[in-house]
Image: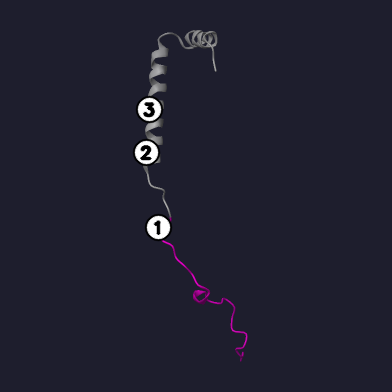
Amino acid sequence: MFGISEMAIVLILLVLLLGARKLPELARAVGKSARILKREVRAADNEPAAGPKRVIEVTPADVIDPRPDSGASRS
């Protein structure tokens, strides 16, 4: 993917932009973030798939017709 020369150029640019003192802090933060990401991915893989907790089945007989009775006489 990257050769040695490209990696060296990127490292030199990082040293120039951030300074030599900030690089260890940056490396620690990146490493910590990577560990947290790995841990969360593993935790998500170990959780069972969440399905519906309760299924309610409705049959046509259970549905109430919302229309008023058309055969009823009005006074």
Q: Residues within 10 Å of mark 3 (few under 14, many from 20)?
A: few
The kind of residue on which mark 1 rests is: Lys
Residue 11 image point, x, y percent: 49, 10
Residue at 47% from the left image edge and 9% from the top image edge:
15
Residue under pointer 2: 43
Mark 1 to mark 3: distance in Å?
33 Å
Query: Mark 3: which amino acid?
Result: Arg
How much space separates mark 2 and mark 3, taking CA atoms? 12 Å
Q: Is residue 25 left or right of residue 15?
A: left
Residue 66 in magenta stretch: yes
Mark 2 residue type? Ala
Q: Main secondary structure of the magenta part?
A: loop
On the image, the x and y values in percent for residue 71 come to 62, 88
As rendered, which of 31 and 49 lies closer to the eye? 49
Mark 2, other Cα within 10 Å: few <14 / some 14–19 / many ≥20: few
The disc, 1 or 2, on the residue closer to the chain's N-terminal end is 2
Residue 6: which disc? Answer: none
> The N terminus lies in which quarter of the figure?
top right
The quadrant in which residue 32 appears is top left
Q: Are marks 2 and 3 in contact (CB under 8 Å)?
A: no
**What residue sits 37% from the left and 41% below the top?**
46
Question: Which structural element holds mark 3?
Answer: helix
Spatial CA span between label 1 and label 2:
21 Å
Q: Which residue is mark 3?
A: 35
Q: Quadrant of the C terminus?
A: bottom right
User: Where, by quadrant of the figure, is residue 31 drawn?
Assistant: top left
Q: Is residue 70 above or below residue 25?
A: below
Image point (51%, 11%), residue name: 7
Q: Which residues are magenta?
A: 52-75
User: Could you say which disc has been placed on residue 53 in the image?
Assistant: 1
Q: Earlier in the sequence, mark 2 or mark 3?
A: 3
Question: Do callouts 1 and 3 mark residues in contact (Cβ within 8 Å)?
Answer: no
